[in-house]
Image (cartoon, helix red, strand yellow):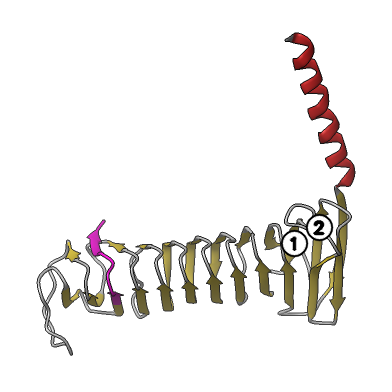
Amino acid sequence: MQRATSYAVVTILVLAALAAAETTRQEMHFKVGRRASVSIVNQYGAISIKPGPGKVVAVTAILYSGKVEIDHSKSRRRVSVSSHLLEGATAETGRVDYEVLVPSDASVTLHSTTGPLHVEKLRGDMMLEGTTASVDVRDVNSGHIHIKTLDGPVTLTNVSDGHVEITSVGGDVALNAVNGSVVHVNSGSGKIHYDGDFGDAGDYSLTSHSGDIEAIAPAYASIEVIARSVQGTVEKDFPLQPEHTSFVPRAGSAFAGTMGEAGSSVKLLSFSGKIHLKKR
């Protein structure tokens, strides 16, 4: 038994050493002008973007085999980097993890099939696309945020003064402390969770087909709200001032009304999911 254990340990160490030998690290630096555009396309693996010093885009790519190469191009205001899979590459051998530093005002476009995608502390616009990739955006402001996923979960945290548009077929979407002029989320079967104050002059729309919608807001929220589920149930924890609508409010399936000065418009709509407007 002891000899078998020793063989197993040796085998694991050998495999780890072989894997480490296959792993390579590439670093690229590109000088750019104001409001640069940065595009990263990665079939398999993570992409993480944070602000860095100066007008420089610094890309660190970790390749996990010789079955993938890095292609890149650069102009004064645009940097493009992509993973180039070679013949025979798989999800494991074609994996590349990217760590990227960009100017805080840069606009970024990221695509990864498996992800995850992570962006933080930027002020520029961003387009993030993935299949099963998870998407995490945090501590950003004043930018347009467009996110499209198939099944990957999406989380936004501390987003202020944003223009947010999220489309997901089956992934859950969580918005924490998110406000802006436009916040639109559309999900097929995924759940939608919002925890914030809805700002004071925004257009908020949370729509699902079969996923549940939960919106949590403080007692001081200033909103004009419409909530309706065709086949699901609808609940609210707030007393609302009634208002005229294009549909007939029905207990348990639809309601409409205002709170405070009704500064923001809020629509919570689902075909068969449950909707709950909660008081924090």
The one of 122 and 152 positioned closer to us in this rendering:
152
Q: Count the marks.
A: 2
Residue found at x 67% / y 70%: 110
Q: Are marks 1 and 2 in contact (CB under 8 Å)?
A: yes
**Is 233 part of what is drawn in magenta?**
no
Residue found at x 75% / y 52%: 92
Q: In the drawing, what numbered circle is on residue 60?
A: 2
Give the SS element for disc 1: strand
> What is the span of residues highlighted in magenta in the rendered image?
267-280
Q: Give the image location of residue 150, x and y in percent.
A: 53, 68
The one of 45 and 54 positioned closer to us in this rendering:
45
Residue found at x 78% / y 80%: 78
Residue lying at the far top in this picture: please name it.
2
Q: Is residue 198 left or right of residue 162?
A: left
Image quadrant where residue 181 sits: bottom left
State the residue position of label 1.
100
Q: Give the image location of residue 240, x and y in percent.
A: 14, 72
